[in-house]
Amino acid sequence: MRFFFALMIGLASLLAGCGSDIDSADDLISAHMAALGGHEAWQAIHTISSIGTYKEAAFEQVHRFDQSRPNFIRITTNYDEATGDFGYCEGFDGGAWEYSFKIPVRVIGEPARALKNASQFEPSYIDYRRKGFQARFRGRTQIKEEEVYHLQIIRERGAVDNFFFDVESLMSSIDLGRAPFHGEGAIIEIFEKRSEYRPVAGVMMPHKIEQISGEDTLARLTWQKIEVNQTLPENWFSPPLSAEQKQFKRFRSDILAGDLQDWRGNYDGYQKTALGNLHQRLENELNTFGYELISHKRYADAIQIFQLALSKYPGSANLYDSLGEAYLLHQDTLNAVKNYRRSIELDGDNQHAVDILSQIAASQN
C-alpha cells in the first residue's frame, strides 16, 4: 500500500505585514517583522507544534508537525491526539531518520537533505547580518497570478534562499522549488502557497498550505491547532525505539534489577520480534523502490520489483496493494483487480483497495 507523504516545509517561513514604501531588503524585512508581531515575540518562541488534516487526492490523515530551535523537526502521520498513536514519522535530530512499521532507520541522500533543510527553525532572513549572510531585494514580481516582493538571502558558499511576500499583506505567501516526488521519486517543480494567517502567541502563522505541481494540486494541509513552547517528551526529535529495542530494554532492566525468573523466555521473545522487524524492513525497501520506479513512469519495471518482493513475502497485503496500483497505472485493469482483491483477502481493513475496486467497477458500468 502506498504511503502518501508530502514534505511540509512552510512553517519555517512565517510572518506577515503591510506596507507600501518597500524599495530595499531591509525595508521589506523590517515591515515584515513588524507585521509578524515583532522581533521580540518571534524570539520568545522556541518550539512550534501543529496538528491538522493532510489531504492528497482521496487520501486523508491527521498529521502532527513539531519544530524546535535551532534545527530539530519531527513529522508524524496518521496521528491520534487522544492516544498519541501514529502510523509513521520522520525527523531530524542532527541526523535524518524515518520510522515506519515500528522500525527506525537513519536515512541518507535526497530524503536526508530535505529533512535537514526543513529542520531550520528560523528563516535565513531573520537577523541575516548576525548570521553572516547578505540580502538582496529583487523588487516586485508576479508568480502564478500572485503579486509578491522577492527577497534573496545569500548564505555561505554562495547558496541562495528565495522568499516571496504578498505585496498587500507582506505575508510569506509562496515558495518555489524542485524536489523528488515522495522523497525518492522523479524531480518535480513545486509551487507552495500559504494562507489563512492567524496570530499564535502574538506571532502570525499560516493555517493552510497547498502544494501544486503544474496544474495539479499535490496536497492540502490545514492546521486545526498550533501551539508554541510546549513541554515535549524527552528525545521527541529522535527516532522512537523499535519494538525489539523496547523488549531488550525491559529484558536488560529486569536482569539488572535481579529478576531472572524468565530471562530465557524474554530473550526468545526479543529475538522473534527482531527477526520479524528485519523481514519487514527488507519488504519496505523493495516496496519503496517499486514506487520510485512508478514516479519515473517505469510501470513494467515496478511490477517486476513488486513481484520479486511478493516472492519473498507472499503474505503481504501491502505488496499486493502496491502491485495492483502498478498494474492499474500500466493499463492492465484485469491484473490490478486480481491483486487488489488478494490484498483485501489478506487484510480485510484495507479500505484503500476497496475504494479503488469500487472506482474501477463504476468506470466499467
Image (cartoon, rainbow, N blue to C red):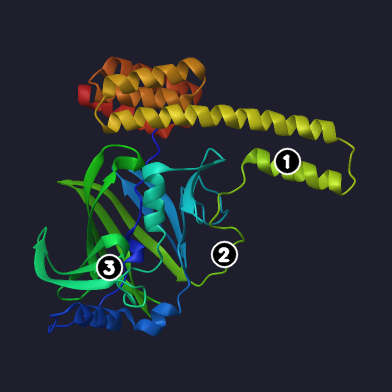
Q: Identify residue for label 3.
A: 196
Q: Residues within 10 Å of mark 2 (few under 14, many from 20)?
A: few
**Observer-nearest residue: 174 or 130?**
130
Q: Residues within 10 Å of mark 3 (few under 14, many from 20)?
A: some
What's the residue at 32%, 69% (across, down)?
Answer: 124
- Can see residue 86? yes
Q: Residue at x 35, y 23 (%)?
A: 324
Along the line of sight, which residue is nearer the eye, 361 or 356? 356
Look at mark 1 in the image and give the residue it sits on: 248
Residue type, mark 1 in image = Phe
Task: Give yes or no for contact between labels 3 and 1 (Cβ–Cβ under 8 Å).
Answer: no
Q: Which circle, 3 or 1, is nearer the viewer?
A: 1
Q: Residue at x 42, y 65 (%)?
A: 225
Nearest to viewer (mark 2 / mark 3): 2
Amino acid type at mark 2: Leu
Tag shown at residue 20: none
Question: Do callouts 2 and 3 mark residues in contact (Cβ within 8 Å)?
Answer: no
Marks 2/1: CA–CA distance: 25 Å
For label 1, the SS is: helix
Against 9, residue 39 (above or below) is below
Tell me, yes or no, if residue 314 can be seen here. no
Give residue 232's mark. 2
What is the three-letter code of the residue carrying label 3?
Glu
Q: Is 77 positioned to the left or the right of 222 in the image?
A: right
The local crowd at label 1, few if under 14, some if 14 to 19, many if 20 or more residues have their Cα within 10 Å, is some
At mark 3, the secondary structure is strand
From the viewer's perspective, is the residue at label 2 or at label 1 nearer?
A: 1
